[in-house]
Image (cartoon, grey):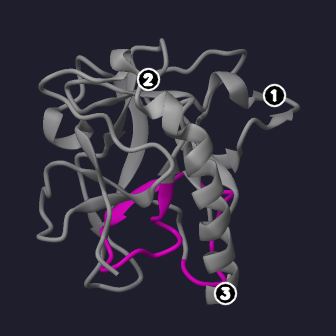
Amino acid sequence: MSVSRFAAVLGMCAVLTACNESAATSPAASSASFQKPPVGKIGQLRLADNLDRADGYCLDILGSGDHIRTDMPLTVHNCKPGLYEDEAVMLAADGKIYFPAYGVCATAAGVNKTVLAGAAVMPRGCGERSPFLEAQYLQHFVFRADKRVELSGSGLCLTAGADSASTFDPSHRWRSLSMQKCEDAPLAQSQWQFFEPKE
């Protein structure tokens, strides 16, 4: 995607931000010890614990440049400096985690409205309805006060894998991403924060 096209997408997201402002200020959405991530802003969704990387780990679409793989599960990749398209997400008022550069949302892999522990998380069309996929049940996440991100009503949370490995660039690392029972997921691998990198 060209820089000018990405800039146009960012402009469209600014319009969505204005539409989502009222939902973001709901009194039920906040508590004294927890600040809900901003709705409609673009940034990185990163683990609160950096684990084995000084730069930490971010939610990431597999691939790079012209070789983005929206047909493969999402991963957790070491956070890149600045805001790269494959790590740039926008949080919607309805709980969707949207990748604006590619027009897809984080989607728990499930069947018949059900997601099981260990399920992958895929980049799929937001609100997609296709054979064996009813995305409206698989794309709504709740940012909990304990910093975990739960698929709404499922008891399953976004969780990074315990192990990391190098990517095609030996200086970069990645981890798997799956839905795990929130109460069983290690905090270091399942607590998240929204971060807006400096340009």
Q: Residue at x 39, y 51 (%)?
A: 176
Q: Is residue 34 above or below residue 192?
A: above
Q: Is residue 153 above or below residue 2?
A: above
Instruction: Point out the stretch of residues depicted in magenta.
Output: 64-89
* Residue at which label 2 appears: 117
Front residue of 89 and 177: 89
* Element marked by disc 1: loop
Label annotation for residue 48: none
In-image side of 177 versus 103 (left or right): left
Mark 2 vs 1, N-terminal side: 2
Q: Nearer the viewer, mark 2 or mark 3?
A: 3
Residue 92, x across and y down, in percent: 54, 40
Mark 2 vs 3, N-terminal side: 3
Amino acid of disc 1: Phe
Q: How many residues crowd mark 3 within 10 Å: few (<14), some (14–19), many (20+)?
A: few
Spatial CA distance of label 2 from label 3 is 40 Å
Q: How many residues crowd mark 1 within 10 Å: few (<14), some (14–19), many (20+)?
A: few
Q: Is residue 161 above or below residue 34?
A: below
The quadrant of the rendering that contains the N terminus is bottom right
Whether residue 87 is in magenta: the answer is yes
Front residue of 176 and 34: 34
Residue 57, x across and y down, in percent: 27, 60
Spatial CA distance of label 1 from label 3 is 36 Å
Whether residue 85 is in magenta: the answer is yes
* Element marked by disc 2: loop
Mark 1 vs 3, N-terminal side: 3
Residue 130, x across and y down, in percent: 87, 34
* Residue at which label 1 appears: 132
Quarter residue 198 falls in = bottom left
* Residue at which label 3 appears: 4
Q: Main secondary structure of the magenta part?
A: loop
Amino acid of disc 2: Ala
